[in-house]
Each structure stands twice: as C-alpha cells, then as structure tokens.
Image (tube, rainbow, N blue to C red):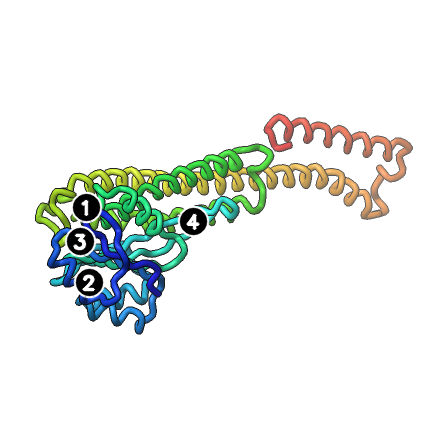
Amino acid sequence: MIVDCAIYRDGKRTEGPDDLSDALAQCRAEGDAFVWIGLYEPTEREFDLVTEEFGLHPLAVEDALKAHQRPKLEMYEDSLFMVLKPVAYEPESDAVSSGEVMVFLGDSFVVTVRHGEESPLAAVRRRLEADPEMLRHGPTAVLYSIADATVDHYLEVATELGTDLEELEAEVFSPQLGGSRNTASRIYAFKRQVQEFRRATVPLAAPLTRLSGSGLATAAVPFVNVDAQPFFRDVNDHLMRVNESVEGLDRLVSDILSAHLAQMSVRQNDDMRKISAWAAMAAVPTMIAGIYGMNFDHMPELHWVWSYPAVVGIMVVLEVLLYRQFKRRGWL
C-alpha cells in the first residue's frame, strides 16, 4: 500500500498528487520539483499503477514485489534501481533482523518500496523535510540520505555485536562458566547473527563504490548528480569500516568456538585421566582379592595367622604409592 506520497518543490513539501502522470509531467516541466512515493509491501495490483505511470522496468518491479534480494544497483533506460537491507538489533534476544528497501530513481521521481519492519525511510523523510537545502538536490538527496541512514545504523549494530562478543568471550574463558553445556550453541547462534549481518553489509560495497565513482567505476551513474559522488564516498568509507568490523567479528567468533572446543577436549582428557587413575587404583586390591579368593587347597598363605593383615597392609601401601604417583603427574 502507499504509505506516503508528496511533491517536493524547491526543497519544500506540497500536497500529494491526485493523478501521478499529471504530477510527474508537472515536476519535469518545473525542473526543481520531484515526486516521492513510499510503498509498504505492495501487491502486484497496487504496484501496477506506479509501474505504468513511471515506466519502471519489469525486472526491477519483479524484484521489488518478491523481495529477498541482495543489496545491488541496477541501471535501466528510464530509471535506477537500488536495493538496501536495513538491519535492527534486538537486545532482548541478542538477534539481528533485516528488512529490505528498494529505491527507484528517475527523472523527477523517487519510488521507495519497503519490506519488513526495519526501515529508515520515515526518519529519512522527516529529516529531509526539515532540511530544505538538502532536499533541493532532488532525488539524489533522497538516495544518499537512505544509504547514509542505513550504513550509520550498521555501525550501531556492529558496536552492539562487539559488546555481545566480549561477553561471550568472557563466558568461554571463565573457569566457572566455560564448561556450560549451552556455550557452544550460543557461540554458533552468535555466528549466525554475524552471517545475517554480513549478508546486508558486504554486497552493498559494490553499489556504493559505483555511486561514489571510486576504483574502476569512474563513469557517472544516470539520474544521480555527479556532485554527490563525494557524499556517497563518505558513506562508502563508513561501510568499509562496518565490513572490517564484521570480518573481525566473524574471525574472532570462529577463534572463540575453536578455543571452547579445545577447552572441552582438554577437560574431557582430564576427566579420562582421573577415571583411568581411579580405575587403576581400584584394580590393584581387586586383583589381590581375586587371587586369594580362588580357594585352592595348596595356598599356604591361607593358613598363616598374619595373612589377612599382611594382605590388607600390602593393599594399603600399594594404593598410597599409586595415589602419590598419579597426584605427582597431575592425574588426580
């Protein structure tokens, strides 16, 4: 459904258009105006009117309707299509969730399509409407503001994940908590959150590099003001910081998982050594008792007065010697 629709003239909002084609033609004729339409999870029928009036490419429309897209930038004859994945961090569940924002940019129009609850669009629109100087730059300002708000929130989520990872690391290396049974599952769950975050941030690097004119992407992007390249370059720099943080988080959580598994292996080896030591100590009196329990006729020791205390004494001495030996080797 359409959640917001307005014409912006000279950086100021005016009433929404009754007829999209007339509004678009008027904006193009004026030169300093553009239409911005915001949609939330539209159906195919709801999107047909927008597609027809703005001449959106059918492949881009299909992506916008189905969602589940990677961040990307595609250029068509009459419009520019960009996909971003805003993310949100939920402190209660320590989970990262993502949505999708599709932006159609063309001559004097912007169409934004939102899927999921995680979206900066409402805040971006309010901020731009409070800054007419920025809004005068037209659709390019809208695209830049959406990208900037999305990446800035990435930085906040990366910080939250870093804090969670520090707590998880402290738990793993804590003598009291390091051996808890659910630690490995918590580490693996955290790694899944990092992967979810990576799916939003890493693919966005190529589109922002293209918009910023960095690297091999020196040609101007259609429908985007070339003067905005330094601003997109700044957003791209922030994204590079985020991606470096994500790579660091991924490597560190893998190292923590390996360390935890190594700890568990060492602990299991210690337990096995202790069990083996106690079993060896139990085997000695069992063996002696087994020999003297055979009740053969020709066992002179059975008829000695001091046989019982002598055998018990030997058992005690052997047990003490074995205990001291295992204790010295660290098995007990």
Q: Position of residue 35 (x, y in %)?
A: 22, 57
Cα–Cα span, label 3 and label 2: 10 Å
What is the quadrant of residue 251 in the picture?
Answer: top left
Q: Position of residue 261 (x, y in %)?
A: 49, 42
- Circle 3 SS class: strand
Name the amino acid, label 2: Ala
Crowd class of label 3 (few under 14; some 14 to 19; many from 20; radius 10 Å):
many
N-term-proximal mark, 4 vs 1: 4
N-term-proximal mark, 3 vs 2: 2
Please name whichever residue, 327 or 101, is drawn nearer the observer in this view of the structure.
Answer: 101
- Residue for badge 4: 96
- Residue for badge 2: 23
- Residue for badge 3: 33
Residue furthest front in the image: 15
What is the quadrant of residue 155 in the picture?
Answer: top left
Crowd class of label 1 (few under 14; some 14 to 19; many from 20; radius 10 Å):
some
- Residue for badge 1: 136
Name the amino acid, label 3: Ala
Crowd class of label 2 (few under 14; some 14 to 19; many from 20; radius 10 Å):
many
**Which quadrant is the C terminus positioned in?**
top right
**Which quadrant is the N terminus positioned in?**
bottom left
Q: Of tags 4 and 3, which is closer to the observer?
A: 3
N-term-proximal mark, 2 vs 1: 2
**Disc sitting over residue 257 in the figure:** none
Residue 205 lies left or right of residue 30; in this view the side is right
Crowd class of label 4 (few under 14; some 14 to 19; many from 20; radius 10 Å):
some
Residue furthest right in the image: 305
Q: Of tags 4 and 2, which is closer to the observer?
A: 2
Q: Of tags 4 and 1, which is closer to the observer?
A: 1
- Circle 1 SS class: loop
